[in-house]
């Protein structure tokens, strides 16, 4: 797994983009999700030209990315997993984009740490688009109000919305719902689509797809 799979994903993305029939938009970007993978698997992907990477844990990312960044200073690191408020400072120091802003307390902590570091990080608001009990994310019916709070009260740079549709259901209606919600909130960027459904997500307007196993192979959590 590696560079060949990366090429395949990229050409699938380009083909899917031609099937999008909405308004003009920038080409969707690929985030290679490298969680659980080490530098030896990540390096060939960097060498193949990929520069956007996603990690879901602050500590794991801290253990591998500072070294890789010395070699590839132009890479962009995306936090795509849940963020604890006690890790906000480390997250702000390490990541370039955060896709998992999902509550007011976290918004306030991010604001404080970004001010302290003199850094403004683009953020995506994570929406619990399937309204699943166990899943993180803002409830769809509270999203517009939350986005407004982040933008107007805190002055945060909210780029768009992020979601993970429920497992085992066709994802298209959930992607459509996220796009609708974003438009109502005045946002035009969407972080949606993973290995199983990134082509569908692009057809429906994704700006960023987050693809792990289709590039790196199945993950081993043991
Ligand atoms: C792991 C993960 C992905 C990538 O999942 P794959 O199915 O391996 O492509 C995407 N988004 C989030 C939030 C993840 O945690």
Image: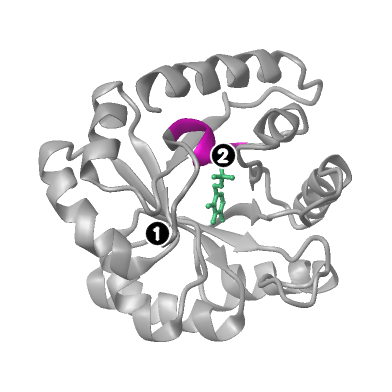
Q: Is residue 46 above or below residue 211?
A: above
Does residue 38 appear left or right of residue 56 in this picture? Answer: left
Q: Residue furthest front?
A: 222
| Displayed quadrant of residue 200 | top right
Circle number at residue 208: 2
Indicate if the residue with disc 1 has its beta carbon within 8 Å of ligand 1: no
Image coordinates of residue 164 in percent, x first then y, are 69, 55
User: Disc 1 versus disc 2: distance between alpha carbons?
Assistant: 16 Å
Of badges 1 and 2, the one in the foreground is 2
Of callouts 1 and 2, the N-terminal one: 1
Q: Within 10 angstroms of label 2, few (less than 14), some, or many (20 or more) residues?
A: many
> Which type of secondary structure does the marked residue at label 2 adopt?
strand
Residue 209 lies in the magenta stretch: yes
Q: Is residue 155 above or below residue 108?
A: above
Query: In the rendered view of the protein, which quadrant contains the N terminus?
Result: top left
> Which type of secondary structure does the marked residue at label 1 adopt?
loop
Which residue in the structure is indicated by mark 1? 121
Identified at 26% across, 28% down, the residue is 44
Image coordinates of residue 201 in percent, x first then y, are 72, 35
Identified at 71% across, 63% down, the residue is 127
Q: Which residues are magenta?
A: 207-215
Identified at 50% across, 57% down, the residue is 80
Image coordinates of residue 162 in percent, x first then y, are 64, 54
Q: Within 10 angstroms of label 1, few (less than 14), some, or many (20 or more) residues?
A: some
Does residue 36 appear left or right of residue 15 in this picture? Answer: left
Foreground residue among 157 and 204: 204
Residue 135 lies in the magenta stretch: no
């Amino acid at each position: 797994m590696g560079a060949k799979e990366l090429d395949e994903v990229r050409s699938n993305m380009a083909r899917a983009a031609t099937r999008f029939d909405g308004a003009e938009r920038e080409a969707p970007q690929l985030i290679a999700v490298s969680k659980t993978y080490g530098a030896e698997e990540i390096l060939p992907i960097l060498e193949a030209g990929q520069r956007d990477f996603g990690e879901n844990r602050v500590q794991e990312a801290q253990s591998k990315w500072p070294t890789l960044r010395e070699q590839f200073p132009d890479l962009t690191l995306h936090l795509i997993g849940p963020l604890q408020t006690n890790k906000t400072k480390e997250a702000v120091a390490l990541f370039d984009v955060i896709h998992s802003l999902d509550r007011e307390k976290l918004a306030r902590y991010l604001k404080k740490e970004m001010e302290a570091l003199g850094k403004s990080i683009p953020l995506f608001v994570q929406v619990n688009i399937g309204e699943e009990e166990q899943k993180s994310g803002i409830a769809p019916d509270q999203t517009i109000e939350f986005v407004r709070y982040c933008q107007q009260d805190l002055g945060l740079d909210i780029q768009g919305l992020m979601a993970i549709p429920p497992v085992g259901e066709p994802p298209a209606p959930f992607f459509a719902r996220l796009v609708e919600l974003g438009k109502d909130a005045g946002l035009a960027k969407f972080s949606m689509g993973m290995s199983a459904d990134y082509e569908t997500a692009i057809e429906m307007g994704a700006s960023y797809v987050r693809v792990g196993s289709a590039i790196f192979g199945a993950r081993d959590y043991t």
